[in-house]
């Protein structure tokens, strides 16, 4: 009985060694391919970051006049994301969600610069308002409806007017819930009435 137990233990130990050796062998064999895959992923990420920077640089050049007039602000929020903030009056007439001629021209400039962004980058369009109630004559129930309609107008212009794929577009609306200035002055309210366009990778 004892000999049998010793033999079984010996066989099990051999099996364990084989299993460990096999796992070690597979690990050694597959390591180069894993490294190559990681290197490709790293290079792709670096290329995407370079493309985002190039797109941001193009935005700065294309919108130089609007940036100088403080109507547009550009800000890189991460290596793979930047934000373009546009004041309401540059895009829309008061109480309206229809892009004015100046607004359509600006969106065309944005789209041209976006061509340098990575093919997998997308645009998130966010509508904001001040805290004043909307005029009844505007046709919008409240600031939520107005900020959403304005964000949608920008997206439609990018899709229909500038031929950017709908799958790359996202819409958000926050009404007056994310102010960047005090709503107690006209200057502050003007800053809060804005459209944010985020160019994001990933």
Image: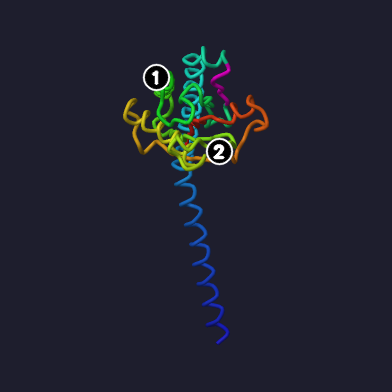
Circle 2 sits on which residue? Answer: 133
Where's residue 180, x and y in %?
Answer: 63, 32
Secondary element under disc 2, as helix, strand or loop, is: loop
Circle 1 sits on which residue? Answer: 101
Q: Could you say which is closer to the camera, residue 135 or residue 169?
A: 135
Q: Could you say which is closer to the camera, residue 19 or residue 173?
A: 173
Quarter-of-image position of residue 5: bottom right
Q: Is residue 69 above or below residue 142?
A: above
Horizontal side of residue 198 vs 131, given as left or right: left
Earlier residue among tags 1 and 2: 1
Residue 73 within the magenta-colored segment of the rendering: yes
Q: Nearer the viewer, mark 1 or mark 2?
A: 2
Q: Which residue is at the far bottom?
A: 1
What segment carries the magenta color? 70-75
Counting other residues with Cα less than 10 Å from the Cα at mark 1, is it few (<14), some (14-19), or many (20 or more)?
A: few
Quarter-of-image position of residue 103: top left
Horizontal side of residue 39 vs 166, given as left or right: right
Q: CA distance from mark 1 to mark 2?
A: 26 Å
Where's residue 123, x and y in %?
Answer: 44, 33
Q: Which residue is at the far front?
A: 137
Quadrant (top left, top right, bottom left, bottom right) of the N terminus: bottom right
């Amino acid at each position: 009985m004892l000999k049998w137990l010793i033999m079984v233990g010996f066989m099990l130990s051999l099996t364990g060694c084989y299993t460990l050796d096999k796992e070690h062998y597979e690990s050694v064999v597959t390591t180069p391919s894993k490294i190559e895959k990681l290197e490709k992923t790293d290079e792709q990420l670096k290329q995407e970051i370079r493309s985002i920077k190039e797109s941001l640089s193009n935005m700065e050049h294309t919108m130089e006049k609007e940036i100088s007039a403080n109507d547009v602000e550009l800000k890189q929020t991460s290596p793979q994301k930047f934000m373009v903030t546009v004041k309401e009056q540059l895009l829309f007439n008061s109480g309206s969600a229809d892009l004015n001629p100046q607004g359509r021209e600006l969106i065309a400039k944005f789209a041209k610069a976006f061509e340098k962004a990575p093919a997998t980058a997308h645009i998130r369009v966010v509508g904001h308002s001040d805290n004043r109630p909307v005029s009844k004559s505007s046709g919008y129930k409240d600031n939520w409806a107005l900020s959403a309609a304005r964000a949608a107008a920008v997206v439609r212009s990018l899709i229909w007017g500038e031929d950017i794929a709908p799958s790359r577009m996202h819409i958000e609306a926050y009404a007056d819930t994310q102010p960047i200035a005090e709503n107690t002055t006209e200057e502050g309210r003007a800053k809060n009435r804005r459209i944010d366009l985020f160019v994001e990778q990933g």
